[in-house]
Structure formats: C-alpha cells, structure tokens
Image (spheres, rainbow, N blue to C red):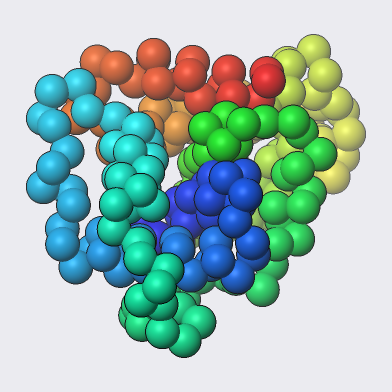
Amino acid sequence: MCRTYWFPLYAYVRRRGHTKEDAEDLVQAFFSRFLAKNYLEGLSAERGRFRAFLLAALKHFLANEWDKSQRQKRGGGAAHLPLDWPTADTQFQLATSVELNPEQAFDREWALALLARVVERLHAECAAQDQARMFEVLKPFLTVGKSAIPYPQAAAQLGFSESAARSAVHRLRRRYREVLRAEIAQTLSDPANVAEEMQALFSAFAR
C-alpha cells in the first residue's frame, strides 16, 4: 500500500503549499501513524472507497495530528519507510505542468499509480509464461484505440503473422481490463461500484 500510494499523498501535500522536505516528513509520519493505529478499521463497510478514505485520513492527520512544534529531526521521529524520495520532487515538478487543485492532483496520481500497478502485474504474468518480450512490444498498445495499433509492425518485431499479432494484442488488452477491474475492486468495499470508480479515475486524466 505504501509503495503504491505514497506519491498521490505526497502530491496532495505539495499542492497544499508544503515544501519538499515537509511533504516527505508529513507523508512518512502519516503512514507510520496509519499503520500503527490500524486506520483501516475505520473504513466503512458500506460503499467504501479506499481512495477517498485514504485522502480523508490524510486531511484529518494534517489538520489535527501533526504538531510541527514537536518535530524532532527530519522525519519527525517516524519510522523510515523505503519510499522513492530521491525522485519524488522531480516527478512532482513534471506533474505541475497540469494545473490542478490538491484533490485533483491526488486523484490523477492515484489513477497513474493504479495503472502502473496493473502494468506491473501484467508484466509479471507474461514473464512467468516466458512472454516478457511479447509484453514489451505490445505494452504501448494497451491504452490506444484499436485503429491506431500498427499490427504489421508488431508482427514483424515478434516474428508473428499479422493474424497472430492481432490475437496477441486482443488477449493482452482483455487481460489488462480484467486486472484493472480486479485492482479497483480491491480498493472498494462494494464490488458493484467498480464501473463507477473506473469512470472517476479515468476522468482524472481529462482535467
């Protein structure tokens, strides 16, 4: 959870006006408190969305549970988590090319993190089936329109017939959708809300 969703929280805190160093401290402290206090017990069993719950928990933490006057050394005395802080500010600066408020920034980075997790799972599945090369060639076609897929080029790269390349792309895109739905379902208490949550996440890219 921390590895997947730390950057959306970091982006939110930065958009709230905090410095790079303060944002790192705050997110570290938040996750330490989140895990130590088992905040997940507060997640409602009725139509709960982990995305919304996590952001609400962070807002509560920022408003009520972080006393800057009690900060010790950098990190606030919180247990250090193995997160990719060296690249965080660069990633944030790239993201600021899009004008978003803190909540929109969180939603956009959450969506990106979720899609990255889906691609990671697909890569692992293909690698386990000795299809890592095929995945690398076909990965760019997962999110483009079917009419934009250069099947002859993909076939040539893989040594497939064009028909075989079309079938491989179709299977990978279908599996991509399945894994995406499964990943989203894991963040919801009611699986019936998967389609609604998918629409909300994809709309984050339209802003």
Quadrant in the picture for the C terminus: top right
Of residue 4 and residue 11, the one placed in the foreground of this image is 11
Q: Is 67 on the left or on the right of 94, as rendered?
A: left
Seen in the picture, residue 64 relative to 153 is either above or below; the reply is below
Measured from the top left, where is residue 50 in percent x and y? 30, 37
Residue for point 15% across, 58% down: 38
Seen in the picture, residue 51 relative to 16 is either above or below; the reply is above
Residue for point 20% across, 21% down: 47
In this view, the residue farthest toward the front is: 69
Seen in the picture, residue 113 relative to 124 is either above or below; the reply is above
Measured from the top left, where is residue 141 in percent x and y? 72, 31
Of residue 108 and residue 122, the one placed in the foreground of this image is 108
Measured from the top left, where is residue 193 in percent x and y? 29, 17
Q: Is 62 on the left or on the right of 137, as rendered?
A: left
Measured from the top left, where is residue 71 in percent x and y? 41, 77
Of residue 125 and residue 181, the one placed in the foreground of this image is 181
Q: Taking the image as drawn, is residue 167 in sight?
A: no
Residue for point 29% across, 58% down: 65
Q: Taking the image as drawn, is residue 110 in sight?
A: yes
How many numbered discs sit on the rendered protein? 0
In this view, the residue farthest toward the bottom is: 73
Q: Is 38 on the left or on the right of 115, as rendered?
A: left
The quarter of the picture where residue 27 lies is bottom left
